[in-house]
Amino acid sequence: MVAETAEEALKLAQEKAPGLTAADLEQESDCLDTWFSSWLWPISLFNGILDPDNSEIKYYYPTSDLVTGPRHHFSSGWHE
């Protein structure tokens, strides 16, 4: 379940399995924010930490900014 609170997660879980209780749920402790984690793969794959100016980083990521789209595409109320 993806929810902001334990109560909301329980409510969503009970829609699929009515007999669940709060004791049946466990909050994931190993979770990365998608904005941050989306940059981990290319930095790791292309050795961008140890060699940030290497040819692969420059070829596949030719700018110094990670642009995901126009600002108006994102709602201010978006939560993961």
Image (spheres, rainbow, N blue to C red):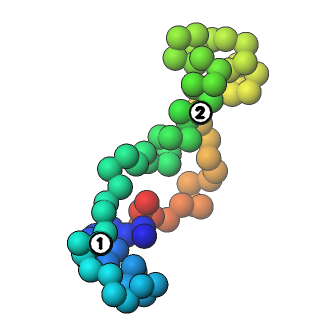
Image marks 1 and 2: residues in contact by CB distance under 8 Å: no
Q: Is residue 79 above or below residue 12?
A: above
Residue 48, quarter of the rendered image: top right
Q: Residue at x 53, y 33 (%)?
A: 40
In the figure, is residue 24 to the left or right of 16? left
Q: Position of residue 37 (x, y in %)?
A: 50, 40
Q: Is residue 29 visible?
A: yes
Specify the quadrant that holds the C terminus. bottom left
Place residue 62 in its image quadrant.
top right
The residue shown at (37%, 89%) is 18
1 vs 2, front mark: 1
Q: Nearer the viewer, residue 79 or 10?
A: 10
Residue in front for this viewpoint, 66 or 56 = 56
Q: Is residue 39 above or below residue 9?
A: above
How dense is the environment of label 2, judged by Cα within 10 Å: few (below 14), some, or many (20 and up)? few
Q: Which dot marks residue 64?
A: none
- Tag 2: amino acid: Trp
Residue at (53%, 11%) from the top-left corner? 50
Q: Is residue 8 visible?
A: no
x then y, percent, for residue 76:
43, 63
Q: Amino acid at mark 1?
A: Asp
Q: Which residue is farthest right?
A: 59
User: Left or right: where does residue 44 sit relative to residue 54?
Assistant: left
Which residue is located at x 57 percent, y 25 percent?
44
Residue 20, image x, y percentages: 32, 81
Total numbered labels: 2
Q: Mark 2 = which residue?
A: 41
**Chain-order first, disc 1 or disc 2:** 1
Residue pointed to by mark 1:
24
Q: CA distance from mark 1 to mark 2?
A: 33 Å
Q: Observer-nearest residue: 14 or 75?
A: 14
Task: Name the secondary structure under disc 1.
Answer: helix
